[in-house]
Image (spheres, rainbow, N blue to C red):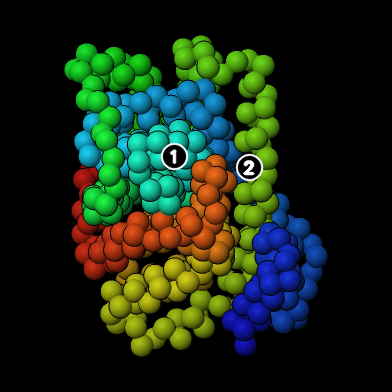
Amino acid sequence: MTITIFLGSLLGAMALGVPIAFALLICGVALMYHLDMFDAQIIAQNVINGADSFPLMAVPFFLLAGEIMNAGGLSKRIVNIALAMVGHVHGGLGYVAILASCLLASLSGSAVADSAALAALLVPMMTAAGHNKERSCGLIAAGGIIAPIIPPSIGFVIFGVASGLSISKLFLAGIFPGLLMGIGLAIAWTIVARRDDVKPLPRKSAKEIVATIVDGAWAMMLPVIIIVGLKFGVFTPTEAAVVAAVYSLIIAVFVYKELKPKDVYAVFVQAATTTAVVMFLVAAAMVSAWLITVADLPGELIALLEPFMDNPTLLLIVIMLVVVAVGTAMDMTPTILILTPVLMPVVKQAGIDPIYFGVLFIMNNAIGLITPPVGTVLNVVAGVGKISISDLMRGVWPFLMAQLAVLFALVAFPVLVTGPAKWFAS
């Protein structure tokens, strides 16, 4: 009965068009009435405590870093490096998009910001070269969702706060799976790009490649600083976010000089606007999370999943399929906040490594960003690339299948996550 009220109130409010943050509050109130413990003070306390979190301070700073990189020329230089390295091969612009997606993912951790930047820079170039526009936009959308996997990742920050797991361990565990997602995209692009009659870009000389790398060296230093700093305990993930934002601002204003001082305010306002949406979602979700624990919703779910508890792989497959289905109707952040407190006790009861599960869970939620009808990244790329959602859905299909294949390969072979994670952490 508790699960029915939880899902009914949440989905009912969303069906009526209530914003997700308020739908979460309505869900909390419904659970309170069901448990006969309604108290407005509890709601207020949980909302305040939900946003009052030191690890969550990483979110606004990583968002700010992403905005600065796009406005200050760091993202553009990353794309130029990728162009110099692989732009000359057949279908090279597609490989540029994939390589740039992996590099940008190590800078901002925001799928929306990375996808918007790459779509603006590469879609005109790819279509002018003769590539199919639908597939070009689909590839860039699928590449953008690597951002929540390779550190720094806003998704891992939110999941770490909601689950109580080490964000640093999640960051390090996400490196290799994120690269596997890029490899999966490269294989899919190799297959679909054969039908495009395109002329490759001229091969860059060694001198030009070196000049491009030197020009982008300041941008490339950021992921090195963050990963080395986290690995050796120089700073926490939250402090890493501050380092990323300050470093990006200094490079954009004083080194590349593409972000003018008069434009800094507008960049900060944009980052603050996005942060407000995310933080209010987190705060509202804490009300439901507290009541989920009080109502013992995980206990009821464990009882429902009892037939699968003795087979962790089968249990993970069932959970991943459920998350895929949820991802088609809900954005990444609310999905993490709603499902994490419900699923983590199930995962621990089944003896599954929580860090390993966290990587799979965030990968799955990232894939949800390119599944219709709600896929946020789909909408962003459609807007920037000036293409209809229906056309983009056709273009993204082969790359969505490639990402799902990588996800379920990691379900079948946990060592692909746990092995590299131990190596990076050692």
Q: Residue at x 54, y 26 (%)?
A: 71
Q: Position of residue 62 (x, y in %)?
A: 52, 37
Comes first in the chain, label 1 or label 2: 1
Quarter placement of the N terminus: bottom right
Q: Residue at x 41, y 83 (%)?
A: 305
Viewer-proximal residue among 330 and 98:
98
Quarter placement of the C terminus: top left
Residue linked to disc 2? 275
Residue linked to disc 1? 123
Q: Position of residue 421 (x, y in %)?
A: 26, 49
344, above or below 155, in the image: below
Viewer-proximal residue among 140 and 35:
140
- What kind of element bears circle 2? helix
Q: Residue at x 23, y 31 (%)?
A: 88
Q: Is residue 245 left or right of residue 9?
A: left
Residue 418 found in image quarter: bottom left
